[in-house]
Amino acid sequence: MTALNTAPRTSRTAPARPVTPPAKPRNPWRVVITVAITVAVILVFWSVKVDWARTVNLPADIARYLWLMFSNPAWDKVPEALWQTWRSVEMAWVGCLLGIVISFPLSFLAARGIGPAPVRFVLRGLFSLIRAVPEIVIAIVILSVTGLTPLTGALALAVNGIGTLGKWGYEAIEGVHPGPIEAVHAAGGSRWQTVRWGIWPQASPEFVSFWLYRFEINVRASAVLGLIGVGGIGDMLTSYTQYREWPTVGALLIVVIIVTVAIDLTSGAIRRRITEGSRVRDLA
Amino acid sequence: MTRISPETPAGAAAAAPAPWSIRLRDATVRYPNGVVGLNKISLDIEAGEMVSIVGLSGSGKSSLIRTINGLVSLSSGTLEVGDHRMDLARGRELRRLRGQIGMIFQGFNLAGRTTVLNNVLVGRLAHTSVARTLVGAYRPRDRQLAYEALDRVGMLERVYHRAAHLSGGQQQRVAIARALAQEPGIVLADEPVASLDPPTAHAVMGDLRRINRELGITVLVNLHLLDLARGYGNRLIGLRAGEIVYDGPAASATDADFERIYGRPIGDQDLLGGAASSASTASPVSLPGEPV
Amino acid sequence: MSAAEYPGLPAKPGGRWKIWLAIGIIAAITAVTLAPGIGVDFSLDAILRNWRNGTEKIGQLLVPDWSFFPRTIAPLWETIQMAIIASVIGAIVSVPLSMWAARLTNPNPVTRGIVRTLLNIVRAVPDLLYAAVLVAMVGVGALPGIIALVLFNVGIVVKLVSEAIESGDPGPGEAARAAGATQTQINRAALLPDIWPPFINQALYAFELNVRASTVLGLVGAGGLGLLIDAVRTFYRYDQLSLIILEILVVVVLIDWASAVIRKRVK
């Protein structure tokens, strides 16, 4: 049967027989769900306590404040800002290290095939519990013992880090190729020999990569922790925001942005080296 | 053979383009990395021809196909399609010309997650305003052209299927329908059957031949398998290192000619094998030299 | 030396020094961050001083003040409203921005560079700092919170989606270009269909993050549960804080579950 046998040229503008496509399949559930979600979203927009009419002036307002902040930033505050940023980065670093040290063994215990099932279950529950609570709330809980010091910030970041690093860790361990593990089993290796020589060589680049990524996250989070008074750039920024010293706020934001972007770029470059290095090793 | 003169019917076919000729003069393509794709090629292809282009990978056959619709631009020389200087066309004019040239790819290049219909309507984009495209409101005439094109390749039943759910051969037919929906003067095909199994490959090649015979469209097909090149083309062009080393009737090209094009003895890997399947047996005329 | 271990053993490859250098740098930074005066102060006397009082407070966490529940309903609802609104606005804004930021959908290096640089800057500032500054600009309430979340949202979604676009198949776009389409048409008709699933995925992921983030924005006056957190912490009512944390947990788990269900359907 040839599909191409209708008189060609004429049919292009005036088809001899109009081609009718088969009936379009309809999925009523799809329509219902789409309508339901749209209505829900509209209701949320309508019910929230926001004066949407005010948003008309918003772009102009924000432009005015941006001008106040960045037209003439208070450069004399930069040395102090850099010092406070350093304190934030310290919190991030110490919190990251603590998080790594604690989460590292836990992520192995939480991985299928290594930890016993009850331990695995408890640890996974703990990880997701921690991840659900924002760092700043953890910090508020911890500060009742440690007081308003950078240590509180570091500990809060460490706790939060256990949640994320632990999860990424056991996922990475469970994601390795089973071949090398079988090989170690076949050679009579014990459980921990399997971890060391079957799993770790494959998972190590990933681990290092997300340790670095966690540090990037911590750098941002540590600036936020300053808001509750544990020190660092966030502390300084909220004070000057409350005084409405816009040129200083502008200068502080510039410092935050430059330091964060610089750390991101460095860490990102190292991560790329590590993961691409691992790919080369895989091919070899 | 039912080749119909492009001028019919009077008036009504104003929108339908005539098949286009292709004229290359001293055409050179040099890529930014220094690789020469085409080296001073001069070539005339008449409107309505069916041409097989053969050569090893890297011989320049992909460069040639891509040059003709401006996906690759000439470093020097001239290119005319129909009455238009393709090499000088830019922006809107370039898009208008591309709109008259259908292209078929080795990897089908369908958007897998949307329907067959939406994929075929991509062929109408050059005739559709950006505003209409954004909301997906194609004109009824464009839809009608898409249905017709799908009907021609026997895929109308699948119009609302997701492209990714089709087999390779079906996907390539949808891709052919996309090219036909453009109402093209030329159809270019870049290794259209290299990802397909032999029976499907013959079916798709048969479709291309029927496009050429029944719609009169100029068809250029890149191939690396010599039995397909011999069996489905009327004319055969051999490329090697960016230069034309053979140009003659496809049916009478000998194995020695192919060895000259490939620069090595030919063997089984250069043949697809398998009899031309339903697609070509269904066509009214069988060409001499068709694979048996 | 190796010759003594085994005849013909090749010398150990070089390059181990890089690992030792990395360890040295990490140790040095750690030493500085823990040094007295310029580092995180690990002095234990504050902890010892607060210990009794602190453990008592943390003990309160174990007995939530259920009678506080009615007062938390309105702020909790506002938190969810803020997250939903910011996610919807953020998702809509992210579609064109993602396409501007990816090479496949925007071949122009100048505009692509501008969009990417702006987004890197937007991403460098954490959501709570945005909220703190915005509260000073537009006043307390849900509005500064929503704006802060939108910025946060756009930063994440555009980065992840533009990366998904770059790693996608250029074929359909090439086919549309060959058929004479403009870049906008290529993006809409040939590339958007295949971008859609990763886009929905990342938008949902951003929504999950938004729910977490929106619970604390009130700490700087940007509306939602955070306002209550700020109030109860001033009075050290850890039994009430405990209830709030429980509510955050429930909401986050529910939203994650709902978004997982939707994700599965989109695939």
Image (cartoon, coloured by chain):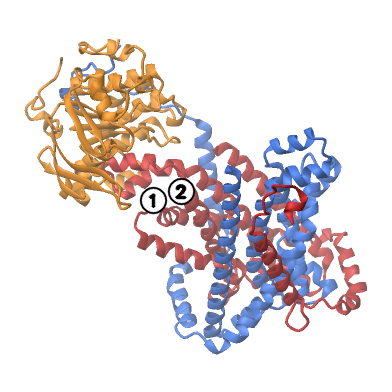
Chain colours: A blue, B orange, C red
Q: Is residue B241 left or right of residue C229?
A: left
Q: Chain of mark 2?
A: C
Give neighbour class at mark 1: few <14, some 14-19, many 20+ (Cα, 10 Å): many
Comparing B233 with A284, the one in front is A284
Residue placed farthest to the bottom in the image? A76
Q: Tell me which residue sits at (82%, 60%) in the image.
A: C67
Q: CA distance from mark 2 to mark 1?
A: 8 Å
Mark 2–mark 1 CB contact (< 8 Å)? yes
Q: Chain of mark 1?
A: C
Where is the C terminus of chain A found, in terms of image quarters? top right
Q: Type of residue at label 2?
A: Ile
| Residue labelled with disc 1 | C105
Labels 2 and 1: the sequence-earlier one: 1
Q: Tell me which residue sits at (45%, 41%) in the image.
A: C194
Comparing B148 with B91, the one in front is B91
Q: Secondary structure at mark 2?
A: helix
Q: Secondary structure at mark 1?
A: loop
Q: Position of residue C95 (x, y in %)?
A: 45, 52
- Asked if residue B84 is positioned above or below residue A221 in the image, the reply reads above
Give neighbour class at mark 2: few <14, some 14-19, many 20+ (Cα, 10 Å): many
Where is the N terminus of chain A found, in terms of image quarters? top left
Q: Tell me which residue sits at (22%, 17%) in the image.
A: A6
- Asked if residue B109 is positioned above or below residue B94 in the image, the reply reads above
Q: Is residue B256 left or right of residue A210?
A: left
Q: Type of residue at label 1?
A: Thr
Q: Position of residue B40 (x, y in %)?
A: 17, 43
Which of the 4 image quadrants contains residue C82?
bottom right
Q: Position of residue A146 (x, y in %)?
A: 83, 74
| Residue labelled with disc 2 | C165
Q: Position of residue B275 (x, y in %)?
A: 34, 11
